[in-house]
Image (cartoon, rainbow, N blue to C red):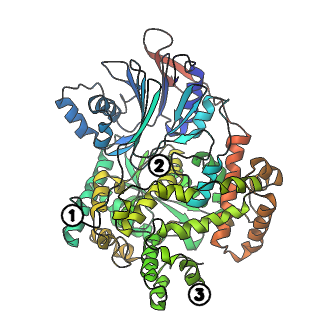
Amino acid sequence: MALSATAPSPSREALLRMVTTLAHRGPDERGLYRDRRAGLAHARLAVVDLLHGQQPLADTSGPTWIVFNGEIFNYVELRDKLIALGRRFSTHSDTEVVLQAYQVWGQAAFERMNGQWAVAIWDAAACRLVLSRDRYGICPLYFCEHGGRLFFASEVKAIFAAEMAIARAFDSAGIDQTFTFWTVIAPQSVFQGINELRPGHVRLYENGAVRETAFWQPHYPEMSGSDRDRFTGSCGEAVEKVRNALEAATALRMVQADVPVGCYLSGGLDSSLVAALGTRFAGERFQTFSLRFADAEYDETYYQQLVAAATASEHHEVMISRGDIAAVFPEVIYHAERPILRTAPAPLFLLSKLVREHGIKVVLTGEGADEMFGGYDLFREAKVRRFWGRQPTSSRRARLLERLYPYLSRSPVRQQAMARQFFGRNLQDHQVPGFAHDTRWRTTSAVKRLFCRDMRAASEHCAAVSELLGGLPAEFSRWSFLAQDQYVEIRTLMSGYLLSSQGDRMLMAHSVEGRFPYLDDNVVALANSLPDAYKLRVLDEKHVLKRVAEPIVPPQVVARKKQPYRAPNALSFVGQDAPAYIREVLSETALRAANVFDPKSVAILLGKCRSQAGDGDLSNADNMALVGVLSTQLLHQQFIANRPCGLNKTELRIDVDHERRDDHERRERILA
């Protein structure tokens, strides 16, 4: 989009480069729209209204256009309300509902939407551009201002493809955030000049001005005083409410699709409950998909097969080895577009490939349950540490640490003296915001010891933690400690890593859309309103959710100890069969070119990991460090050193199916 009347018009070639770069997100159809000020391009994954949902889509009554990635699950309800207000529709797509809803209700339309989206709406008459992103950032949306123009896209690679003159360099603040929180936090990205629209926000460009506002923020009951949003029923009543809300959320995500919907099955409580509910709405054929691991420590096949049998699903599995992880890791980073500190996205990349090979475009997953219902060990750990912090000299309270992390071969609580030293830090701050996360942030930040001199100096001027905590909502201090911990987890790891690097990016790499019943608006509002004891009952995580699952999920799954999804990490890259690219990107030449890590420090780390590989057990710090260094180096090679840009070498045939006024304003459908 040209930010002023004198800026260059969007070129057709740039739009083609952008949409071709994003072909993996939408292989079914591509379309373009251009006028003198703006250009829109769309790569479509056809899920709803397969015949008439082409994009960019125009309002029938005026020159307003939309491109939209995602799904609005209550679009039928919204459509009926709009028809009652006199609106008329030419398609049965949720895209047209989004466009008309915005024209009727303005920004308030996004508050009414229950779904996941990245949206751009261009009003050519008013020269107004609206960008919007869903509440939790399920769908990505990046933007960059350069040379008097605004570039925006679902992925950074499309912005880079649009204009070669856009700088390609790491942003030290983004790197610092990554090696603090495991991820960047929007609007920050790891690339200079590239920003990410914050979840739950709308960004408006009009008359040379820019305005960004939030249309949604998480809300929790306040500890003192009455709060109309606080759930006041019994735990049994809460179980019934959660069951009904989750069943309705799952049903919406199963039936609001004109293609079959499958389900991921990890073997844990969350995906098992979704699968058990989903099978009720799947018709005659319900397909489930699971990961198996050659390393027994990570394998959950027994529980997966129990649930597959209980749901009578058509079950598919893919076996993952360390070599598989190493082989696909460069592709994983290409799609993630940010450094990662765990290899966990790599198996999910291969799982989405399996899904697509079986003809499925949409899958349900259990993501969001831990954040909404208090499922993480981090929440239990914080509760123990706060309890201990009220009597820091108590040895009995400290022994509660032994109930954490039973699934880890190198559990941080196995050696009591070291555990008490590690978890006993900063106990005096047990009421301070961020207390629950400080052990993770300290552990992650230790990787910064590998930074080169320039990056270390730049990092010292960054203040990732203080900036995050300084931007907390005014009511944050009035929430319970569990609610505070949930909010920070949602703001950091869930949005930036779980829903992005492990979620959308690995799914869309193979043109698969993920849907998340636990992130349904009604489920979230209910979960946030529940008393802490219904979610974390003493140290029993997700208590209410377990009771919902008891009648329909195998008891072995409901009763099993929490075991988060994990995959082999550094050991995937240090064996005798390690791919050649590892030596290349970790060479002194490549490390100096990227200018993030010190070559000597990396060489020492790599040697240490190789020497200990025979033991089959590396420390958490070394695992995280090697994966973080390797992923950063791959990112530099792919996006900065090689400067990718240009059309794929496939021929595209253009069929102009809509023209307006002159050659500077048209919509084109691309037939690959």
Q: Nearer the viewer, residue 346 or 440?
A: 440
Disc 2/disc 1 C-alpha distance (Å): 52 Å
- Nearer the observer: mark 3 or 1; the answer is 1
Q: Which residue is mark 1?
A: 226
Total marks shown come to: 3
Residue 223 located left or right of residue 564: left
Q: CA distance from mark 2 to mark 3?
A: 51 Å
Residue ID at (50%, 10%): 663
Give the structural element (helix, strand or loop) at label 2.
Answer: loop
Which residue sits at x=44%, y=79%? 384
Q: Earlier in the sequence, mark 2 or mark 3?
A: 2
Q: Residues within 10 Å of mark 3 (few under 14, many from 20)?
A: few
Q: Amino acid at mark 1?
A: Ser
Q: Earlier in the sequence, mark 2 or mark 1?
A: 1
Kindly identify which residue carries mark 3. Answer: 417
Mark 3 vs 1, N-terminal side = 1
Q: Which residue is mark 2?
A: 358
Q: Is any part of residue 309 visible from this angle?
A: no
Q: Secondary structure at mark 3?
A: helix
Picture coordinates of residue 587 (x, y %)? 81, 54
The kind of residue on which mark 3 rests is: Ala
Residue 371 at x, y = what percent? 40, 62
Please indicate, yes or no, whether residue 223 appears anywhere in the rendered image.
yes
Assess whether mark 1 and mark 2 are in contact (beta carbons under 8 angstroms).
no
| Residue 484 in the image, given as x and y percentages of width and height | 40, 64
Report crowding for label 2: few under 14, some 14 to 19, many 20 or more residues within 10 A (C-alpha).
few
